[in-house]
Image: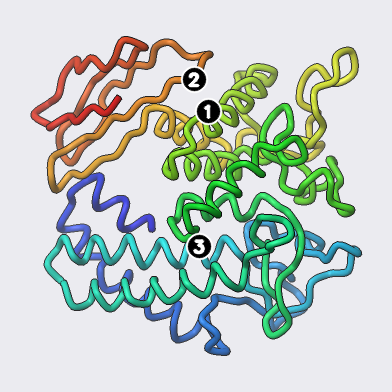
Amino acid sequence: MLFATTVRWTGDQALYHDLLPAALHALDWMDLYADADGDGYIAFEPRSSAGLRIQGWKDSRDSVVHPDGTLATLPLALVEVQAYAYAARMWMANLLELMGDHNRAAEVRAGAAILKERFNVDFWLAEEGFYAQAIEVGKGPIREVTSNPGHALLCGILTPERAAQVAARLVAPDMLSSWGVRTRSAADPNYNPMSYHNGSVWPHDNSLILWGLARSGFRDQANEIAGRLLEAASHVHLCRLPELMCGYDREPGMFDSPVPYPVSCRPQAWAAGTGLLIVQSILGLEVDAFANTLRIAPHLPPWLSTGEVRNLRVGKRRVDFRVTRAGVEVISDGGVTVQVEQ
């Protein structure tokens, strides 16, 4: 995903040819090694008792549990990992097509289509109108509502109808706190606002969710989450978002600001990247350096009237522009074709 995105933004063909063998090996790895039992999903099962039991971004021992609190059994296939695998295939297929490797692109795209079809059957929880956090390989889905499926929105693996259901649930009161989306639904029996991964709010988690909402057309929901993250930042020293916050809502006179997680890192690289995705999502920025094109599709929230971007790289060129409620003003296009969509 990162390789395909970087090449599209920079137009760096030398980088493409240099890293392409590694990227193709990564595609092969997903099929040959990550899917050990051949069921079509990337799963993990640690071979050592000394390492992490759960090998996803939520790597706490108790981050994947059943409603009754029992730990999920291994191996596990995480929902967001399957979504990343789909996006990796699709974004790579698009890049391969662009670079003239049509046969390989078609092969990769076909694998992605098979994954998407199976994913929307196996991970869907009809009673919740949401996707499972994970599947216990050979047993079935973990029937819990967590933030993990929000990552799938940016990957394009969800059907349109179900994407709308996921978007609605992510901004429902049990998921969306005063400061951002919780890692676990407040209605869940395993919810704990002071837990590392079972009710806290992670800015990086939220940034991927809101970017996915924006990419899927749910711009108002994305802006709502962005606004709450920025409100949280306004209560923190240097407006610097922490690694995570407790999942409590604002309560006047009691919790007027985010409740700090005691050992949260500040600064933290994941959290630092949040601001960039907020800007990209609100302004609807897409770059295609090979076509020498910058697309701007702004959707300003009520709390933002003006945005200005300077020195935005498109290939080897740079663009400056300003966005207001009146429209987009291109200050300097640097020779780039700027497409504005209102």
Location of residue 306 with respect to 268 vertically, above or below: above
Judge from the rendering whether residue 265 lies leftward or rightward of residue 32; answer left or right: right
C-alpha distance separating marks 3 and 2: 28 Å
The disc, 3 or 2, on the residue closer to the chain's N-terminal end is 3
Residue count near mark 3 (Cα–Cα under 10 Å), binned few <14, some 14–19, many ≥20? many
Asked if 258 appears above or below 41 in the picture, the reply is: above
Where is residue 47? Give x, y as percent.
69, 83
Quarter of the rendering occupied by the N terminus: bottom left
* Three-letter residue code for mark 2: Pro
Report the residue at 13% width, 45% height from top. Answer: 291
Secondary structure category for the residue under label 1:
helix
Q: Amino acid at mark 3?
A: Ala
Mark 2 residue crowding within 10 angstroms, few (<14) / some (14–19) / many (20+)? some
Residue that label 3 marks: 83
Q: The C terminus is located in which quarter?
A: top left
Residue found at the very far left of the displayed protein: 335
Find out whether the residues at labels 1 and 2 contact each other: C-beta distance under 8 Å. Answer: yes
Q: Which residue is mark 1?
A: 223
Looking at the picture, which amino acid does disc 1 mark?
Asn
Question: Does residue 299 sit above or below 305 in this rendering?
Answer: below
**Residue highlighted by disc 2:** 301
From the viewer's perspective, tell me whether residue 303 is left or right of residue 127: left
Please report the residue visible at 52 percent of the width from the left and 35 percent of the height from the top. 274
Above/below status of 47 relative to 109? below
The x, y position of residue 334, in whole percent, is 12, 26
Quick one: label 3 or label 1, which is nearer the N terminus? 3
How far apart are the alpha carbons under marks 3 and 1? 23 Å
